Image (tube, rainbow, N blue to C red):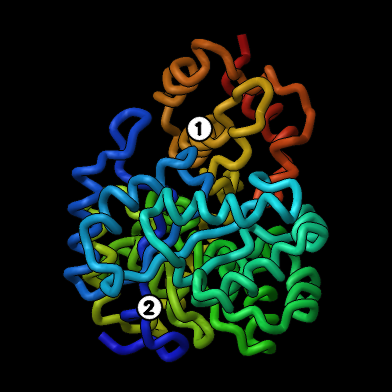
Amino acid sequence: MESNRFFPEIHGNFGFGCMRLPMQGEEVDLAAFSDMVDTFLQQGFNYFDTAHGYIRGKSETAIRACLTSRHPRSSFLLTNKLTGNYFKTEEDIRPLFQQQLEACGVDYFDFYLMHSQGSFNYDHFRECRAYETAFALKKEGKVRHVGISFHDSPEMLERILTDYPELEVVQIQFNYLDYENPNVQSRAVYEVLERHNKPVLIMEPVKGGTLIQLPQQAQALFDELQGGSNASYAIRFAAGFPQVCVVLSGMSDMEQMRDNTGFMKDFRPLSEKEQETVRKVREIYLEQNSIPCTACRYCVEGCPMQIPIPDLFHAMNMKKVFRDWHQEERYAELTKEGGKASACLRCGQCESVCPQHLPIRELLVDVAGVFEKE
């Protein structure tokens, strides 16, 4: 495994994203997660990523139970994030940070990112001197590196990097489906980071699992290559760009862990033939006109009608793209106690936090039209 050219303390270029962990009902399956943590470290990797709101706070405490209390601090790197929903004033930030340290069971974070930065929350971070606080925490030794995770336009990223040139790393959504997506603008955002010579952390390389289950025509193209899993092509695509220092994968079972670490342990970029196949797969997928939701679930927390928006979108995609008529039953099960698409009040809270900038209110009208005909 090659050393990381941007941060020598990072082993390889692959990280464990802890937003989608193995679950038993509403709780993290700690035994399964512990096994995955052990395997990840045994394979030579050491970078873990979480945030205060992941799995309603259970990601941090699961990390304490399965990683930080079981392995020496020198054996892993841990990234956490400062999320705008959890502080109202500058004075709130340090107590929140201390709470995050205690939840994770550590006394410092290797990377601390201003979470999900964009025009919708940047002024709040500025007014509360969040960046300045993070840099102060670095001087105090409680943070090793300060960066941002980002969900907005290239112009907005340019503004942030101009305001805070001392930022050390930027995490972006980047995958072959979003590479030219006019809403996400992955390519243009990456090019801003290239100009500023900032190391790049990649999130959503398989777009929340979207790039695992493909339309039949697209799947046939990858099958012809006989070179690996669908995840391998997606993750290796993202990891092949020169400014990329780590690609995160939100693995939720041991099968995914073994697959991902297998092809990333001896990483090789996509060949020219594989790149061409990925381009063809992208074209086929885009023709399906599916809803590009990554199931991050940011939209669910504040929904006044408790609509399980990502689950309804998944049912819609499965029916539209894969002609899966069982989704009628799935929709009925999801909404048997409320939360139908037609219950939307059109308040817009969901759209204000959606990293994909989806027109959720209009999409819910479409979902209701498909599943609530009667």
CA distance for labels 2 and 1: 31 Å
Classify 55 as above or below 5: above
- Quadrant that contains the C terminus: top right
Label drawn at residue 311:
1
Which one is in front, 151 or 44?
A: 44
Give x and y (percent) for residue 85.
67, 45
> Of marks 2 and 1, which one's residue comes earlier in the chain?
2
Give x and y (percent) for residue 190.
63, 77
Give x and y (percent) for residue 120.
78, 53
**Number of residues whose C-alpha sits closer than 10 Å to that of mark 2, classed few (under 14), some (14–19) or many (20 or more):** many
Q: Amino acid at mark 1?
A: Asp
Where does label 2 land, which residue? 13
Q: Secondary structure at mark 1?
A: helix
Q: Quadrant of residue 231?
A: bottom left
In the displayed structure, does residue 125 sit left or right of residue 354? right
Residue at 19 percent across and 60 percent down: it is: 38
Q: Is residue 314 visible?
A: yes
Label drawn at residue 5:
none
Residue at 55 percent across and 28 percent down: it is: 308
